Image (cartoon, rainbow, N blue to C red):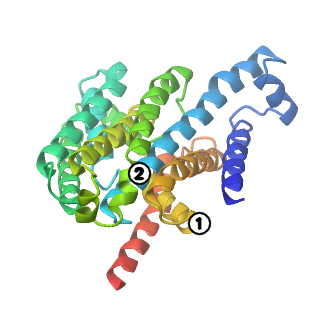
Amino acid sequence: MKLALLILGTITVLLISLFFGAADLSVSQTLSALFGQGREIDITIVQELRLPRALLGAVIGAGLGASGAALQGYTRNPLAAPGILGFTACAALGAVTALYFGFNQLVPLAALIGTALGALLILKIAGPRKGASTLILAGVGVGALATALTGLIMNFAPNPWALSEIVYWLMGSLKNAEMGGLMVCAPLTALGLALLLFVGPDLRTLSLGEETATSLGVSLGKVRILLIAGTALCVGSGVAIAGAIGFIGLFVPHIVRLIFGPDPMKLIPLSALGGAGFLVFADIITRALTGPGTQLYLGILTSLIGVPFFLYLAVKETRT
């Protein structure tokens, strides 16, 4: 019953998102345009602007939610998330570097390269045989370095327009979503999700402890590599297209865990579904609150929701 409600809620949010936008379209006009009927301008708005935006939000949210669930399952730490472990910062550094040098068309590729290099550095520092705590420390350190380098690039921005372009991109948004971006993001996220789902059974065994899991045949080195690779693909592809959108991977898995239980194997697909619905819902809110001359960015909204939740979890952890 709970799973059915989660699926229904996600589908409902996706459909609702098609009715939000600058153009004032009625329900009948939107539905007709969705199926290729009605005025040509309506069809263009719905099929080439609103539909890709909704689908892209769902794909990015699914990747962030699943990667957060996998990282929390591996580290057995509810505070673990792609942003906190440095993946988002590394992707942002790659994209900002491309923006700084004027290679705007290469921003998605640069973000993916930044994520890959960050993932390799985290793996190198964490090592193949060290514990989950070492992975967390390595991720936090690499993320801090990437954030510092991003700030350095912004400091040397050649002009205010270049700086504003970087800043706005870092805020994260789906406003420029298009089918081409979806075609880039979806396959990479799907591959990342496949890797995370593949390590799901091992994460379930790891919940018994690393020594017990090793005695049962779990290869910690293989799990770590697949986990890092899957997370890098999910996060890097999302940041590459929509900019930095944080905290989805932190609180969505935690909420799903409260509803469906702590099994890491089940949490990965459920968090992907929950992340998809939540990010699309957050995007609806940004469009509803955005008026003439006022732009609310998606990454700002998710941070405003996520930071208090993170502080709540941090306080809760210190009291246990």
Left or right side of 23 for 113:
left
What residue is shown at x 55% (from left), y 52% (from top)?
Answer: 270
Residue 241 rendering spot, x and y as whole percentages: 43, 31
The answer to whether one can see residue 80 in this image is no
The kind of residue tagged 2 is Pro
**Mark on residue 259?**
1
What residue is shown at x 71% (from left), y 55% (from top)?
Answer: 5
Residue 70 rendering spot, x and y as whole percentages: 39, 52
Q: In this view, does 225 lie above or below 111?
A: below
Question: Looking at the image, which residue sits at the far top?
Answer: 40
Assign the N terminus to one quadrant of the image. Answer: bottom right
Left or right side of 245 for 261:
right
Number of residue marks: 2
Question: Looking at the image, which residue sits at the far right?
Answer: 28
Q: In this view, does 26 lie above or below 36?
A: below
Q: Mark 2 points at which residue?
A: 201
Left or right side of 307 for 98:
left
Q: How crowded is mark 2: few (under 14 residues within 10 Å), some or many (20 or more)?
A: some
User: How far apart are labels 1 and 2 at the CA level?
Assistant: 20 Å
Q: In this view, does 314 lie above or below 214?
A: below
Q: Is mark 1 on a helix, strand or loop?
A: helix
The kind of residue tagged 1 is Ile
The answer to whether one can see residue 141 in this image is yes
Q: Is mark 2 on a helix, strand or loop?
A: helix
What residue is shown at x 65% (from left), y 29% (from top)?
Answer: 51
Q: In this view, does 207 lie above or below 302?
A: below
Assign the C terminus to one quadrant of the image. Answer: bottom left
* The quadrant where residue 46 appears: top right
Residue 98 rendering spot, x and y as whole percentages: 27, 27
Q: Closer to the camera: disc 1 or disc 2?
A: 2
Nearest to the observer: residue 120 or residue 45: 120
